[in-house]
Amino acid sequence: MEVFVLTELKKANAKHFCDLLDRGRISVYNYVVMTLVGPPFHDLRKVYTDKDKQKFSLGCACSVGIKCIEAIEELHSVGYLHRDLKPGNFAIGKADPRKVIMLDFGMARKYINAQGKQRAPRWAAGFRGT
């Protein structure tokens, strides 16, 4: 799923995602090579041991929030739902720490069909997640 989603995002010139550099299969193992990112937001908050310092400033939180929403919009524009949004799935850029990058598309689902229409909901879906 990672490869499918990142390929579609690359075609759309999306800016809040890793670049897909290579992918393939060796023996029974699939691999994906993408650009390196910085730490996820979940880890950035935990840098300090003092609980009072484990939060972003209002300006930082607003900026990060806007960029996360832009990433979600870009993902939706290529027809996918993430279905696992959490601070651990957003990271800062390695080269540009002001860049927000969305990660982990293992639970993603295509919600737009080949004709560009929204897919009909499934009658029942099994439990996903933990």
Image (cartoon, helix red, strand yellow):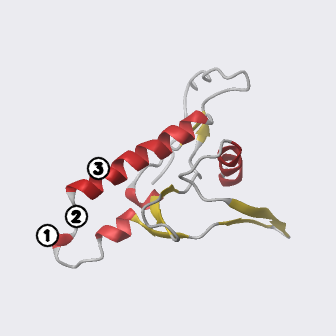
Locate the C terminus and report the quarter of the image it occupies. bottom left
Is residue 127 found left or right of 24 in the rendered image?
Answer: left
Callout 2 amino acid? Lys
Q: Which badge, 2 or 3, is on the more N-terminal residue?
A: 2
For the residue pair 29 and 111, the one nearer the viewer reads as: 111
In percent of width and height, residue 108 lies at 58, 44
Is residue 39 found left or right of 28 in the rendered image?
Answer: left
In percent of width and height, residue 110 lies at 63, 36
Q: Residue 62 carries which label?
A: 3
For the residue pair 52 and 66, the one nearer the viewer reads as: 66
Tag 2–tag 1 contact (CB < 8 Å): yes
Rendered position, 87 above or below 29: above
Callout 1 amino acid? Asp
- How crowded pointer 1 is (Cα within 10 Å; few <14, some 14-19, many 20+) is rated as few
- How crowded pointer 2 is (Cα within 10 Å; few <14, some 14-19, many 20+) is rated as some
For the residue pair 97 and 112, the one nearer the viewer reads as: 97
Alpha-carbon distance for marks 2 and 1?
7 Å
Rendered position, 69 above or below 19: above
Task: Classify residue 23 by image quadrant.
Answer: bottom right
Residue positioned 60% across, 22% down in the render: 118
Tag 3–tag 1 contact (CB < 8 Å): no
Q: Is mark 2 on a helix, strand or loop?
A: loop
Callout 3 amino acid? Cys
Q: Which badge, 3 or 1, is on the more N-terminal residue?
A: 1
Task: Classify residue 20 by image quadrant.
Answer: bottom right
In percent of width and height, residue 105 lies at 58, 51
The residue that label 1 is drawn on is 52
Q: In front: mark 3 or mark 1?
A: 3
The residue that label 2 is drawn on is 55
